[in-house]
Image (cartoon, helix red, strand yellow):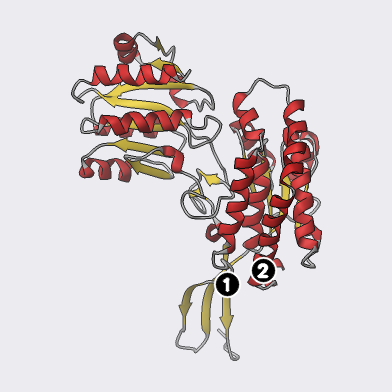
Amino acid sequence: MLHSIPIAKRNTILTRMAALLEQERANIKLVNVEDSVNYSGADLAMRKRLLVDDEKIDGMIASLQQLVGQEDPIGKLLYSFTPENGMKIQNKTASFGTILIIYESRPDVTVEATAIAFKSGNKILLKGGKESLRTNLKIVSLWHQALSDNDIPNHWISYLNFDRNETQQFLEHPSQKVDLIVPRGGEALIDFVKKHATCPVIVSGRGNNFVYVNQEADLDKALSIIINGKTSNISVCNALDKVLIDTTLPKWETFAKKVVSELQQRNVTVLGDATIAQVTNVLQIESDAIWHEEFLDYKIVIGTVNSNQEAIAKINRYCGGHSASIITKNDLLANEFMENIDAAAVYQNASTRFTDGGQFGLGGELAISTDKLHQRGPLGLQHLVTNKWYIYGDGQIR
């Protein structure tokens, strides 16, 4: 098994991969240009996720360097018990075995997710989107070089260059043992994987994140957080899609107009519920169904509520279970909000854009899980493990 390789050697491979990314920086960008030119779709978020520039390569390298400094997640003692018969019983962390990662158009996943799965003792199967095929294959070739430079067989990191039918066949009748599947992408991809998979699946689900502006909010902070959440990167699952403004907020109408104006100046299409549409003259939403949608676009919906409790109820009804933030100076109200919101990450006075493995100190993430089993939120190195029981005896029988 991979986790029998000394941790120092695993770290050496990650360090070597970081060096190769720097060494091949120009060639990676050149290959990525081919993928970008060949993408003919109109999906702006897809195009942004597909792009590999210097900033993204810097992020890949930084995630590898951060992972190198983290402890080995394998073999950590979780529980120990010695019964009267003298046996020694221990529970320790263990690798899953083989993890299949299916993702759309994000070549940085080929680095970050692979690195996390590798260091946590797993064999990795990668199935990226056709849009980023050339870039993914280039990055996988660098992984293979890092492995071979350290006498590790290339089959520990494999790329599955499958079309949709071949992927379905592999999910239903895998040609090798797969212990866990992590799909990263839209709801159509997730539904496809869950329908056909024959092993456990961890869902990296939709965002549809909310900010609630409470009656005791600092309005300058609220405005900054909303602008950042919506416009800093529309193509990610931690982007902001919905804003709720408490009508008990003093001069809330003035604040709502300011938010709409600032968003529109940044080319964001703003829709509102009946109250917001009347106050600000934005288009009114046609149906409450839109509250369920993740946009991945320069688009946002603003609505009103009358209390903390109403905000909690509305967010729990419509959000994707990813992230939600309350803007308030009242710590008691914030605590009530954070304890009762059913999401992987809850915030007080901060942007939902921070829900990210690197920002949380995890060295990147395999995915951001909106499931509750076995781990919720960013899946970092220490989360990508299962457990195993070790029992040491001396002839005991039951």
Q: Where is residue 151 in the image (x, y as percent from the top left)?
A: 80, 68
The answer to whether residue 199 shows anywhere in this view is no
Q: Where is residue 45 in the image (x, y as percent from the top left)?
A: 59, 28
Residue that badge 1 annotates: 75
Mark 1 secondary-structure assignment: loop
Residue 288 or residue 281, whichever sits in front: 281
- Quarter containing the C terminus: bottom right
> At 31% from the left edge and 37% from the top edge, which residue is drawn?
326
Q: What residue type is labelled 1?
A: Gly
- Compared with 58, 42 (above or below) is above
- Quarter containing the N terminus: bottom right
Mark 2 secondary-structure assignment: helix
- Compared with 92, 328 (above or below) is above
Residue 30 or residue 383, whichever sits in front: 30
Residue that badge 2 annotates: 3
Q: Which amino acid does label 2 sit on?
A: His
Along the horizontal axis of the image, is 87 left or right of 190?
left
- Compared with 226, 1 (above or below) is below
Q: Are marks 2 and 1 in contact (CB under 8 Å)?
A: yes
Along the horizontal axis of the image, is 153 left or right of 381?
right
Residue 282 or residue 85, whichever sits in front: 282
Which mark is first along the chain, 1 or 2? Answer: 2
As drawn, the residue found furthest toward the bottom would be: 394
Tag 2: Cα neighbours inside 10 Å, few (<14), some, or many (≥20)? many
> At 78% from the left edge and 44% from the top edge, which residue is drawn?
137
Q: Where is residue 290 in the image (x, y as percent from the top left)?
A: 46, 20
Q: Quadrant of residue 68?
A: bottom right
> At 73% from the left edge and 44% from the top edge, which residue is drawn?
171
- The image's mark for residue 178 is none
The answer to whether residue 17 shows anywhere in this view is yes
Mark-to-mark CA distance, 2 and 1:
9 Å
